[in-house]
Amino acid sequence: MTIREALRSAAERLELHHITKARLTAELVLAHVLSVEREYLYSHDDRVLSEQELQMLEERLYDRISGVPLQYIVGRQEFYGRYFRVNPAVLIPRPETEYIVEAVLETQGSPGLPPSPLSIVDVGTGSGCIAVTLAMELPGTQVFAADVSLEALLVARENAASLGAPVRFVCMDVLDAIETKFDFIVSNPPYVRRDEISRLQREVREHEPHIALFSPMDELAIYRRLVVSGEEMLKPGGHIIMEVGIGMDERVLSLFGPRWDALPTKTDLQGIPRTVIARLR
């Protein structure tokens, strides 16, 4: 079977199982199997695939049809213009999380903040996409990445190494094991309520790490801990920047007491508030 024939057959099978963007998915899976870029598939579309390659393609297609996210199959996801390794130990980076990076970059020049280099800690770093991106975008910045999952930290460390980002890693729950003072605390904490599990896509519900998805019984508990930590660990004029679930922005903002100034919440392309920002007075 040639590459051209394999692509057509794979796309048809994926469409039959209602996989969105079936042709693109087929191309990405086959390119991954062959360890080539997508362009290669069209410049060599008459190449005959080996039995081993066909078997690998079959296994990866089965994974996708079974609900495994494409990003876990190909092992990477783009975030802020860079590719990050992902596996089931970490959440797949989402476009809305890029607003945290944008908020730090926009806020860097705020009154009261020192010029670079800054100090930043990313709580619940997962793949390290936020921490690594900030270290790359703000050269000289001291960036810490924290996560309660050692498996996630191993993925984040690999991403930092492959991209050449000078990030320090700490395995801890929220900010329980660090005493450094920071200019920024950033976080995309787990905020999905467990009673919403049935509403999630199968790919998310069955394959992404629940520890990074679901909030405790009190869905504001981690936000509350981050605010308390911010009062102790931020430098005066420092910022806390957190992603929130849909409809959570006002409740999260209510956690900030008189020591804080709430800044305008960043919204996504649909106008949904997604990134809460506050400055310690």
Image (cartoon, grey):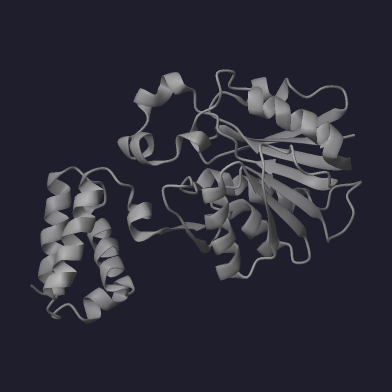
Q: Please tell me which residue lies in front, 250 or 84.
A: 84
Residue found at the very far left of the displayed protein: 1
| Left or right relative to 164: residue 155 | left
Answer with the quarter of the image where residue 199 lies: top left
Which residue is more in the foreground, 121 or 89? Answer: 89
- Look at the picture and state if 212 lies above or below 62: above
Left or right: 167 as drawn, with respect to 229: left
Q: Please give left or right for residue 130 compared with residue 263 in the image.
A: left
Tell me which residue sits at (60%, 47%) in the image: 125
Residue 52, compared with residue 230, is above or below; it is below
275 on left or right of 203: right
Measured as percent of width and height from the top left, residue 75 is found at 39, 59
Figure quadrant of the C terminus:
top right
Question: Can residue 222 be seen here?
Answer: yes
Residue 39 in the image, given as x and y percentages of width and height: 30, 75
Q: Quadrant of residue 232?
A: top right
* Residue in the image at 50% along x and 28% along y: 192
Q: How many marks?
A: 0
- Residue placed at 52% from the left, 56% from the top? 155
Where is residue 46? Give x, y as percent: 13, 80
239 or 146, which lies in front?
146
Q: Is residue 217 above or below residue 41?
A: above
> Could you say where residue 231 lies in the image, as x and y percent from the top left?
84, 32
Q: Residue at x 20, y 81 (%)?
A: 44
Residue 262 visible in the displayed image: no
Instruction: Look at the image and tell me in which quarter the N terminus lies.
Output: bottom left
